[in-house]
Amino acid sequence: MNTSTPNDNKRPTRDTTRSQLTVTLLSMAILVVVITYVISLQKTPLPDFSLLEVKAKKQAFFDFLMPRIDIANKTITEERRHLQLISRKIPKETLTWSDQQFLKKLANDYDVTVANPPDYAALVTQLGPRVDTLPPALILAQAAKESGWGSSRFARQGNNLFGQQCFKKGCGFTPKGRAPGRTHEVAKFVSVQAAVDAYLHNINTHRSYQLLREQRATMRAAEVPLSGIALAGGLQAYSERGDEYIAEIQSLIRFNKLE
């Protein structure tokens, strides 16, 4: 005869509790490892690649930069995933307070103005083309070109691998040969990771790269892999050399078999 009470089957067994505790501890351990890894990447200084032969220098440069590109792209991928989840709710259901706050923060991070009162459907539409990754091939090629494979003064002294500028006095280096009346400086970054993050933000938000973002959105809609060679065509404003600069970036990608 079954003498168990109605609640007996709902009580967790000792083995179940131990299993849940093990999973929790394992998750915490993995999180600690990930955080430690990210911090170590942020603290690791840019190596002196000039000491290596050409082939070894290129590979060492790519190997150093790729984990930092992965971190930046994974962060954006998670933001994009969350944004897409919210977009599916509109206009079917009312967004939660958490969804609304996420969209406002994302708008602030990606330089999108929030209307008063907020139009969340419009906000999602505006953010869509901006909150997206870039092909590692394109990032690696531009970093190599702009920093002389990590050997430029701006790279060595300021972790600036992308020739990024800033406009507040003392924010970076005063470039040699700066035209009279110009006030820009070459930015300094606390780490290479910070430089990678800033580069992605620049491409994803500045009006000069709207064409690149439109090309990327077209690729997404067609469900084809993002191409660094194709997207390089949207870098017309990155250099005063225009089409010649674009051709050099595309050639770098092809020659080094980056995609």
Image: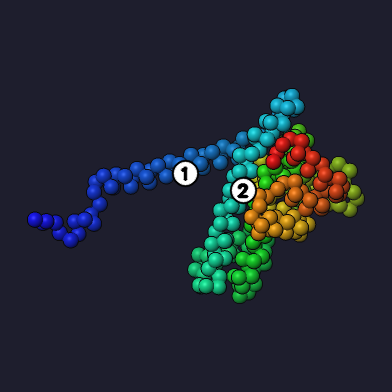
List x then y, in percent, for residue 154. Answer: 76, 39
Front-most of residues 187 and 192: 192
Q: Neighbour class for label 1 at 10 Å: few (<14), some, many (≥20)?
A: few
Q: Which residue is disc 1 drawn over?
A: 31
Amino acid type, callout 2? Asn
Tag shown at residue 73: 2
Q: Is residue 25 left or right of residue 250?
A: left
Q: Is residue 158 visible?
A: no
Q: Is residue 237 above or below residue 65?
A: below
Where is 96 relative to 166, above or below? below
- Could you say which quadrant of the image residue 41 lies in? top right
Disc nearer the start of the sequence (2/1):
1
Residue at the extreme right of the image, as rendered: 180
Front residue of 196/56: it is: 56
SS at badge 1: helix
The colour scheme used to paint the residues is rainbow
Front one among 121 and 223: 223
Q: Quadrant of the C terminus?
A: top right
Q: Look at the numbered disc 2 and give the secondary structure of its residue.
A: helix
Q: Residue at x 64, y 62 (%)?
A: 127
Residue 20 located left or right of residue 123:
left
User: Residue 241 placed where, x, y %?
Assistant: 87, 47
Query: Foreground: 180 or 90?
Result: 90
Placement of 186 over or under 86, stated as above or below? above
Nearer the observer: mark 2 or 1; the answer is 2
Q: The residue under label 1 is which amino acid type?
A: Leu
Q: Kindly identify the residue that appears in the image at 75 percent across and 46 percent down.
A: 229
